Amino acid sequence: MINIKTPQEIAAMREGGKILGEILHELAITTKVGMTTGDINVKAEALMAKYKVAPSFKGYQGFPAVVCTSVNEEIVHAIPGKGRLEDGDIISIDCGVVVKGFHTDAAVAVMLGNVDPKIRLFVETVQKSFDKGLKEIKPGAHTGDIGYAVQHVIEGGGYNVVRDYIGHGVGRALHEEPEVHNIGKKGKGVLLVPGMVIAVEPIIAMGERFYVVQPDQWTVVTRDGSPACQVEHTIAITPTGYEVLTKYGNTTNAIYSQ
């Protein structure tokens, strides 16, 4: 069942989304070569304490951290740890918070130092695919319209959607209906109506779309070792279009270069 949010519930999610946008921005601009991914998690915990919000991820199905920190060939759900960031790395930082009983969910991607120009173009294309998908969101549109737009940009660039990892509804639960795929056909899928809140998250491989789940049962990596990238925002469908709840300031850009 799809949970339609009241204006008061969306207001709570707007409050949480603004805080999450601030947290992810702060994490992105302080992520540097030489840090460990565990350092990012420690920083995230401190920011959550500062803003007095609860983490969505820690304890979710046993996940041990408040952020996912997926580096290079890691696609999603990488557990922060002792791995040290190097010049030329890319990292996707995925985070969720709970405010007044409602989750918001977002992810940014950070390019560190001298990133290969081909990889930089790949990351920028992932952001472009999100932007195209976002423009499809309005009452009367369908989830397939979003997926089609994302897929068209990604495959047009010569990259691949990792099809088993998708966007989703968000609300009192971190993952709700509907499923929001990054592939699709125009006019197909779930009808979008005001009051729905969804997370749109292109999860993309630079090479093949096939993946392997690591022994920790969380970290997902590309089978061919190619780089991967994820960006994400929580978005409310409004009577006239959409509202990005997790944006930082006035921008929906989720790509940073350090």
Image (cartoon, rainbow, N blue to C red):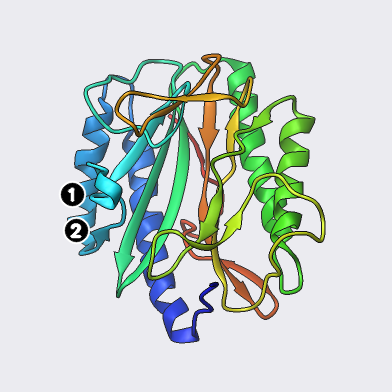
Residue 129 position within the rendered picture, expressed as x and y whole percent measured from the top left: 68, 43
Which residue position holds label 1? 46
Q: Which residue is mark 2?
A: 50
Mark 1 neighbour class, 10 Å CA radius: few under 14, some 14 to 19, many 20 or more: few
Q: Residue 242's image quarter?
A: bottom right
Label 2 residue SS = helix
Viewer-closest of 100 and 42: 100
Identify the residue at horizontal 63%, vertical 20% (top origin).
207
Which residue sits furthest right?
186
| Mark 1 touches mark 2? (CB < 8 Å) | yes
Quadrant of the rendered image containing residue 22 = bottom left
Q: CA distance from mark 1 to mark 2?
A: 6 Å
Query: Is residue 81 shown left or right of residue 33?
Result: left
Residue 200 shows in this picture: no
- Inspect the image, locate mark 2, and give the three-letter code of the amino acid beneath it: Lys
- Residue 89: x %, y % from top left: 44, 20
Q: Amino acid at mark 1?
A: Ala
Residue at the image point whose x is 20% and y is 48% from the top:
45
Residue visible at 39% across and 37% down in the picture? 77
Tell me if residue 226 comes above or below residue 66 in the rendering. Answer: above
Residue 232: image location, x then y, percent: 52, 49
Is residue 23 in sight in this rendering? yes
How many discs mark residues in the rendered view?
2
Q: Position of residue 18 (x, y in %)?
A: 40, 64
Secondary element at tag 1: helix
Between 212 and 121, which is closer to the camera in this rendering?
Answer: 212
- Location of the C terminus by quadrant is top left
